[in-house]
Image (cartoon, helix red, strand yellow):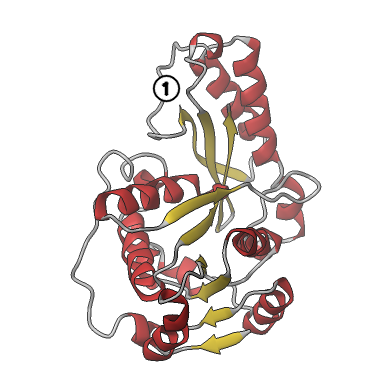
Amino acid sequence: MKIVDKIDILRSSLEPYSRSEKTIGFVPTMGALHKGHISLIEEAKKKSDFVVCSIFVNPLQFNNTGDFTNYPISLEKDMEMLEKAGCNLLFLPNADTMYQNPVRTKMVFEGLDNVMEGTHRQGHFSGVGIIVAKLFNLVQPDHAFFGQKDLQQFAIIQQMITDLSFPITLHCCSIKRDEDGLAMSSRNRRLDEDQRIIAPKIYESLILTKKMLKKGESVEKSQRAGLSHLDKYKEFETEYLEIVDAATLQPLDSKFEFKKIHKETKIAICVAAKLGEIRLIDNIIID
C-alpha cells in the first residue's frame, strides 16, 4: 500500500490509472477504522481495479468543537487494517494541505439538509459537501463507497454528484453491526462500559418501530413506540426518531400505514441519541 500526504504526489500516483481503462474505487474516511470501513474497502476491490482510501478528520463538518477535539485517532492500526484489506493507496493529508486558505464556500442541499441531522448539526452538511467535493476532484474516482449508517450523508452526496455532474457511481454499503445489534462506529470507542451495555437499545427501538409498521400500525403510533422504548432508559437523550422516505428523507404523513404505502417506496427509520457526550446514529431501511 502506497501512502501519500501531498496533493501533487497523489495526482501523479493516480495519473496512470486515470489515463487507462483501469477503474478507481474511493473510500473517504475520518480514520478510527473498524470492520464497517473495511467492508467498504472490500466492496471497492470487487468493483474497481485500484482502491484509494483517505483519512482526514474534517474540521468543517464539526459544529461541536469538543466532538472534533475528542474524535478518536488510531493511525497506525488504521494503516495495518487497510494494508491487510488490500487497499492500494492511502491519502493522508493534514488541514493545511486540504485548506490552504480560509474556506468561504458554503453548500446548501435544499430539502435534504434541513431535516434530522441538519436540524441538530447546523453547517455539518456544508462541511461534508466541501470536503467530499475536494476529494472527488483530487482522486477522480469511477466509484465511491459510503456506509448506510450515514444515510442522510449518502443522500446529500448523491444529490451533489447529480447536480454537479461528477462522473462517479456512488455505492451505499450495508451497516455492519456487533453481535448485540449496535451499529459499528468510530464513536463507539468513546463509550464507557455501562454506556456500551445500553447502546444497543438504539437498534432495538428501530426494530420495534419496524415491527409496529409492518403489523399495520400508523406512522405516528409506530414512531411513538420507538421513542417510548428509548425513553425507558434515562441514560439516553433522544434527538429524533423519524420515519421517512428513504430517497427524499422527508417524513411520512403521521396517519400513513405501511400496507397502504406504494410497494416501490423504500422507508427508512432513522434515530439519533446521545449517551453522555457521545452522539450515536442508526437507521434501517424497509423495502
In which image quadrant can residue 132 be found? bottom left
Instruction: Please give left or right for residue 58 compared with residue 108 in the image.
Output: right
Residue under the image location 38 percent in, 67 percent down = 136
Q: Nearer the viewer, residue 283 or 273?
A: 283
Rendered location of residue 53, percent (x, y): 54, 73
Report the number of discs: 1
Outermost residue to the front: 21
Mark 1 burial class by Cα count in 10 Å: few <14, some 14-19, many 20+: some
Rendered location of residue 133, percent (x, y): 33, 65
Q: Nearer the viewer, residue 60 or 232?
A: 60
Quick one: SS at disc 1?
loop
**In this view, 76 is above or below 171:** below
**In this view, 248 is above or below 169:** above
**In this view, 204 is above or below 100:** above
Rendered location of residue 163, percent (x, y): 26, 50
For the C terminus, the quadrant is top right
Instruction: Please give left or right for residue 76 compared with residue 57 in the image.
Output: right
In which image quadrant can residue 95 be found? bottom left
Q: Which residue is mark 1?
A: 252
In which image quadrant can residue 88 be found? bottom right
Q: Nearer the viewer, residue 174 or 122?
A: 174
Outermost residue to the left: 104
Outermost residue to the right: 179
Instruction: Please give left or right for residue 165 compared with residue 196 in the image.
Output: left
The disc labelled 1 sits on which kind of residue?
Leu
Rendered location of residue 171, percent (x, y): 52, 51
Residue under the image location 46 percent in, 70 percent down = 68
For the N terminus, the quadrant is bottom right
Residue under the image location 71 percent in, 71 percent down = 85
Is any part of residue 276 visible from this angle?
Answer: yes
**In this view, 242 is above or below 79:** above
Is any part of residue 27 visible from this angle?
Answer: no
